[in-house]
Image: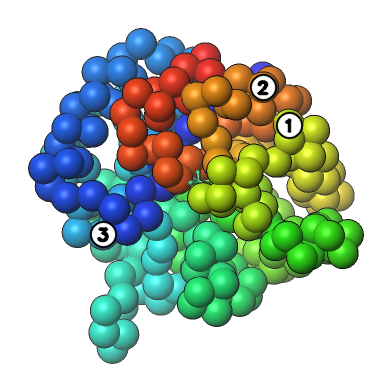
Amino acid sequence: MRRKLVVGNWKMHGSLAQNAVLLGALKSGATQLSRVDVAVCAPFPYLDQLRQELSASTVKWGAQDVHQLEKGAFTGEVSAPMLADFGCTYVIVGHSERRNIYGESSSLVAEKFAAAQQAGLIPILCVGETLEQRESSATEAVVAEQLDAVIALAGAQALRKAVVAYEPVWAIGTGETASPEQAQAVHAFIRQRVAGHDAEVAQGLVILYGGSVKGANAPELFSMADIDGGLIGGAALIADEFLAICRAGQ
Ligand code: PEP
């Protein structure tokens, strides 16, 4: 039985003062959670605050993006070794906002994935289709292309130390959640596709669902066979809501 994992993606939200309140609540709430792993991914400037606040707790932390190279003349970018320096366990790669707003291709996302692992971080690889793609029955083809790019570069074995997050773009921040059955179908597809390379890796792979998860819908989503937890946006900014989601993973 895979342990559940719940990861908060704060996106471009927060302040030192707001974070301190939120982290205080998460730290104490997390002490009640023995069967679920919890993490938060914050904007870069707050990673040191996460390190200070969370080091003595069970809550892990990470970043929301990373550059694909270790160092160099890339003004404004942040490398994987720098994230490791700040104690990050995780880094999100290929979030749909990066793919769609900043034009990140699946091959670039694969490079970021590999760079993260090279630095000892656990990449959280986001995959998912737009509404238009779902309506034209392209969901599996889109998800397969996003997943295959990583397998082609890093190998299926690399998924041993990675997390995949299925995030249908039409469900992110919209209040519209994929039904548990819709999400389960894509999660099973992802696991099957990885099993085509390595059955053992597929069996152990943690696959999160993301897209308008709330305390109210988390229990049903998390009860599905191939849903191993959640990547949480909006609800991760509200301590009670985020903790309710975490408790659904218990
Ligand atoms: C996300 O940002 O990855 C996300 C799933 O957002 P939300 O939970 O707000 O839909």
The quarter of the rendered structure image containing the N terminus is: top right
Look at label 1 and name its amino acid.
Pro
Mark 2 secondary-structure assignment: helix
Q: CA distance from mark 3 to mark 2?
A: 33 Å
- The residue lying toward the viewer, choosing from 215 and 116, is 215
- The residue lying toward the viewer, choosing from 85 and 124, is 124
The residue carrying mark 1 is 180
Q: Residue at x 45, y 45 (%)?
A: 233
Residue 57 on image: x %, y %: 25, 25
For marks 3 and 1, the one nearer the N-term is: 3
Numbered circle sitting on residue 207? none
Mark 3 secondary-structure assignment: helix
The residue carrying mark 3 is 44
Q: Is residue 124 above or below residue 221?
A: below
Residue 94 on image: x %, y %: 54, 63
For marks 3 and 2, the one nearer the N-term is: 3
Would residue 24 be found to the left or right of residue 2 on screen?
left
Is residue 84 visible in the rendered image? The answer is no
For marks 2 and 1, the one nearer the N-term is: 1
